[in-house]
Amino acid sequence: MAERSGRKPRKPHSAQVVRTERLSPHMQRVVLGGDGLAGFAADTCTDHYVKLLFGPAGVTYPEPFDLERIRAEFPREQWPVTRTYTVRSWDPEHQELTLDFVVHGDEGLAGPWACRVQPGETVRFMGPGGAYAPDASADWHLLVGDESALPAIARALESLPAGARTFAFVEIPGPEEEQKVDSDVEVVWLHRGTRPVGEALVAAVRELEFPEGRVHAFVHGEASFVKELRALLRVERQIPREDLSISGYWRLGHNEDGWQASKREWNARIEAEQEGGAAAA
């Protein structure tokens, strides 16, 4: 596949699995390291993410690994697929990259892989991307998400200075999924149980007594509740768009390939509808 004129070919990073750890019944940690991370950096955003590359079963790629060559020489169905994961932490001194994976048994691609991968195995990925870090000039912070957003929320909380006024709501299946976060902010853990994803989060934010002053908000997770909270924050609360980091990480009934294919259009439509409402409010 030819590159567009003036565009540099994207070169994946290569790393090795250093260790793995089960954090909770539905969260698996994988730590990556190795010389391939020498040029990697993820220290400007608390929502930095990488796109892991997974080749189809039985397909072997030539070395050195070259994504552009693969896309030029292999049929499309043999191209690697990507799965996006937040950087939970990056240790530049030891060149260790930590990723946390939500696991639902054998469902999906990356979760089962994270559970079975062994130290020494090679992992390739693109990135990092990212756009959010808590704004130190804000009067207070609002962090909201389901378990898919927990790594980013935890990293944001750990980056805040002591005493920063912050409200953090994280929805998880049950108490067994709570995690220790190295922050003086008390996370409000909302146990979903059998309720729809995000229902408890919407209720919590709606019931929150908003402090005076400028808020900087981070709201991520399943697309439907994110849509509802975007309307609440932009239209009802009139929070400026530039003070919101808000997006659907995933959508019920869609795998990442399907969601990413429709995400831009979904977000544009929702934004157009709600920005009109915010202007009229």
Image (spheres, rainbow, N blue to C red):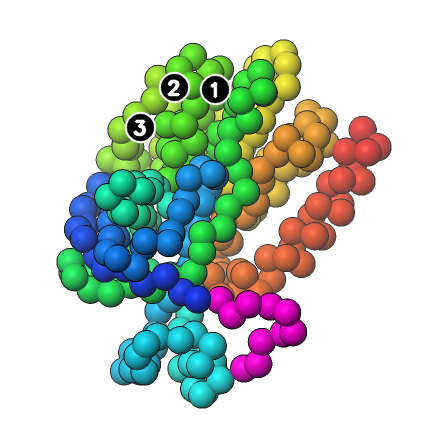
Q: In which quarter of the image is residue 157?
A: top left
Residue 164 forms part of the magenta stretch: no
Decide which of tag 1 and tag 3 comes sooner along the chain.
1
Is residue 222 positioned above or below 53 on the image? above
Quarter containing the N terminus: bottom right
Is residue 281 positioned above or below 49 on the image? above
Asked whether disc 2 touches disc 3, contact meaning CB atoms under 8 Å apart, the reply is: yes
For badge 3, the amino acid type reads Val
Which residue in the structure is indicated by mark 2?
185
Which residue in the structure is indicated by mark 3?
181
Q: Is mark 2 on a helix, strand or loop?
A: loop
Q: Quadrant of residue 90?
A: top left
Q: Residue at x 57, y 65 (%)?
A: 261
Q: What element carries label 1?
A: strand
Which residue in the structure is indicated by mark 1?
166
- Range covered by the magenta-colored residues: 1-10
Quarter containing the C terminus: top right
Is residue 207 in view? no
**Cα–Cα span, label 2 and label 1:** 7 Å
The front one of 3 and 212 is: 3
